[in-house]
Amino acid sequence: MARREMTMADNARPAHEGEEHLEEVGAKLNWLRAGVLGANDGIVSVAGVVIGVAGATTNLIAIITAGLAAWVAGAFSMAGGEYVSVSTQRDTEKALLEKERWELKTMPHEEFDELADLYVQRGVTPEVAQLVARDLTKHDALRAHADAELGIDPDALTNPWAAALSSMIAFTAGALLPMGVVLLPVDAATRVWLVVAAVAVGLLLTGWVSAALGKAALGKAIARNVGMGMLTMAVTYAVGALFGSAVGV
Ligand SMILES: [Zn+2]
């Protein structure tokens, strides 16, 4: 859409700036997608636990305690997993950049030829590739190599703490939905049905947003998302009810 709305003024801007803008939009979409997935996870896990315990007992304190534990455990599990995986990725990228830096220092001529060659492989004529490689090497050799060889932007490595914190927030946003409904002053049976209804609405929303972000067929994606949440609650309720009647809670 942004491309269609480009004006003469936009065209006059250096290409570099426009590219950065598109990359920014892409990064924001990735964060949004991850946030929606985290919220979805928070809704389903906490609702599953709350409904499961409600299948075994009508004791509200027990239900709330279980929901709280599921919320905290889920948020930390998501954040921890995100921290570990982003840290590993960042270490890998840093090591690759370090190797590239060393290669540029120790074998600048080979590296220059390699860079020009990469542009030729992308369809640039050898003469122009030489010019481009020369200018980019003069400007910022490491950035040019990181981009052409590794596909990495040295200034845009993901911060593992930021990734961990945002998945914790996303999970919590989802968890608040079933937790909030559980606290409503209603009788035990109504409470279960209210949680089911709230979860259905919540999953409809997360399913809709993630399908829209992924440009998938809305109806099918929403039905799948809501269906999986309902299945989860049906199973945890059945397990809770079986356990509850077996031990006579
Ligand atoms: Zn290189």
Image: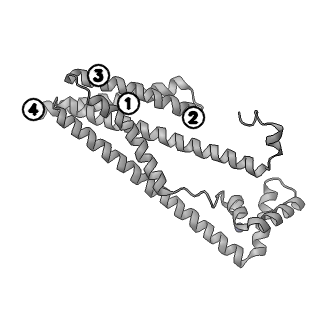
Q: Is residue 85 visible?
A: no
Mark 4: amino acid: Gly
Q: What residue occupies the far bottom of the structure in this picture?
A: 106
**In the rendered image, which residue does mark 1 sit on?**
229
Q: How many marks?
A: 4
Relative placement, left or right, of 194 versus 28 is left
Q: Residue at x 53, y 44 (%)?
A: 31
**In the rendered image, which residue does mark 2 sit on?**
213
Mark 2: amino acid: Leu
Mark 3: amino acid: Trp
Relative placement, left or right, of 172 versus 117 is left
Mark toward the start of the polypeptide (2 vs 3):
3
Q: Residue at x 46, y 39 (%)?
A: 37
Mark toward the start of the polypeptide (3 vs 4):
3
Q: Position of residue 8 (x, y in %)?
A: 83, 38
**In the rendered image, which residue does mark 3 sit on?**
193
Q: Position of residue 80 (x, y in %)?
A: 39, 54
Marks 1 and 3, how far apart at CA: 14 Å
Mark 1: amino acid: Gly
Q: How is the image coloured?
A: one colour
**In the rendered image, which residue does mark 4 sit on?**
248
Marks 2 and 3, how far apart at CA: 30 Å
Quadrant where the C terminus sits is: top left
Q: Residue at x 40, y 30 (%)?
A: 228
Mark toward the start of the polypeptide (2 vs 1):
2
Mark 3: few/some/many CA within 10 Å (<14, 14-19, 20+): few
Relative placement, left or right, of 91 versus 236 is right
Q: Mark 1: which secondary structure?
A: helix
Marks 2 and 1, how far apart at CA: 20 Å
Marks 4 and 1, how far apart at CA: 27 Å
Rendering quarter of residue 70: top left
Q: Which is closer to the viewer, label 3 or label 4?
A: 3
